[in-house]
Image (cartoon, helix red, strand yellow):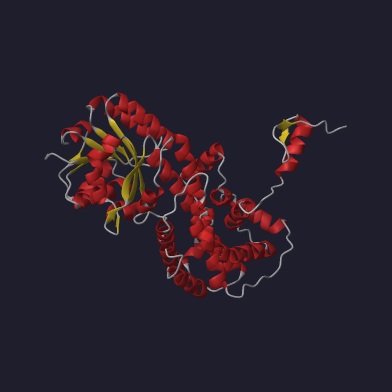
Amino acid sequence: MKTCDIAVYGLGVMGSSLAKNIMSHGFAVAAYSKSPEERARFQRDTGADTVCTTVDEMLEGLQSPRCIFLMITAGRPVDMVLEELCPRLRPGDVILDGGNSFYRDTGRRYEECRKQGICYVGIGVSGGEKGALYGPSMMAGGSLEGWKQTRHILQTISAHADGKPCCDYIAAGGGGHYVKMVHNGIEYAILQLIAEIWYFMSSTLEMSGEEILSCFQSWKKGGLDSYLMEISIQVLQKKDKDGSLLVDKILDVAEQKGTGKWTMQDSLERGVYIPTIYEALSARNFSGKKRLRMQGSEQLQATVQKVFVENPEETLGNALLLGMILSYSQGFELIAKASAEENWAIDFGRLIDVWSNGCIIRSRLLAKIRQTGILISADEPLLLEQGFSWLKELEPALRETVGKSVLSGTPLPALAGALGYYDYYRMKQMPVNFIQALRDCFGAHTYQRTDREGHFHTNWEE
């Protein structure tokens, strides 16, 4: 077997697509999977003569320093593979973890490998199967030395925008996998927003499939232009064999793989408010209660009204656009807080460049955020930046949509969460002073005053 530039360990859907991508750019790949079926399929699909049957064969076929790109299931399987690989590796060798690993696991593995002289790089890979095959967006973290040794391959095979690779080193430790995790949280939010708008149009406003499709096609020509809008149009156009819309026959139970939950858990630990992402995650969880929802539809009563939106294309489009902006704002706020607490010094301009093509959440809106040249920080969320003062023009549409959803008994929790996020940032006075008074009353937890410094306690029974 000839000497290879890189190994791909794991030949499932993503791994095989990535390996084909690397090969198509002229790099020699030592391909390996524990599954004989995956190895056979990859060899049959590519005709490659560098498909390995053992780990040792894979490593022997690599030039030094050796680089192994792991494309395997996150969690314990990664640790098991590291236990298998590390004793066989030499100082300077590089391991790239391209799965959706939890960022703290990546940080731990980076430190463990560093002690052995092995360069461990966590790579957040976005773009799905097609992205992996034709050019994904990739967010690197962990070993800077490992990144430098492999960037010529990674930036060659990644998506490009305006001549620049959508692949860069983001931060030390688990920083690369962290921003991919939050990227997925933003993705959850935007998917839910799109679905809620579609459902409101279809079920509440009783618009036809053709009318809804027309609105989506119009939106894609404007500020809502994005990859997710593009595939939404594909879904709305797809018909079943009997001529009816296929989407209407899909069971309303959504699945998830864990990154949305991690995003939510991390936001709670860091004290960052991300209600749109939370509601998107909760909607997927609740969708599994299909039997109880069917029961509730028969037993629970609601006082609802028939609602009308005068110009749904404009109103709902503006509501969706503001919801998307606020989803980005929530995600960026969480990343900024983590960056400050972990000493990552994440460059948001560079991160947006990485997300400008190849990734699931790429959009014209992200490009507009980039063009403002804003400096995002934990103390200055996106929606308060001067370059986004025009958000107030979209606010009436979001408020009308959420208001009419309430009147009609149509829950749109992600859109409502986005509006709540917006309104919280408008509040000079929150009602939590009353909560502090109650906490002091039952637990002597003390409170602060508006008129003088210090912490105070009152005997509320006197």
Nearest the eye: 224 or 89: 224
Residue 208 placement: quadrant: bottom right
| Residue shown at the point (69%, 64%) measured from the top left | 407
Residue 447: x %, y % from top left: 72, 35
| Left or right of 416 in this view: 432 | right
Give whichever of 71, 105 is nearer the camera.
105
Residue at screen point 38% across, 41% down: 176
Quarter of the figure with the N terminus? top left
In this view, the residue farthest toward the left is: 2
Residue 334: % across, % down: 50, 44
Residue drawn at (44%, 71%) of the image:
217
Q: Quadrant of residue 207?
A: bottom right
Q: Is residue 43 visible?
A: yes
Q: Quick check: can you spot residue 95? A: no
Q: Residue 312, how many percent across, how many down?
A: 57, 72
Q: Quadrant of the C terminus?
A: top right
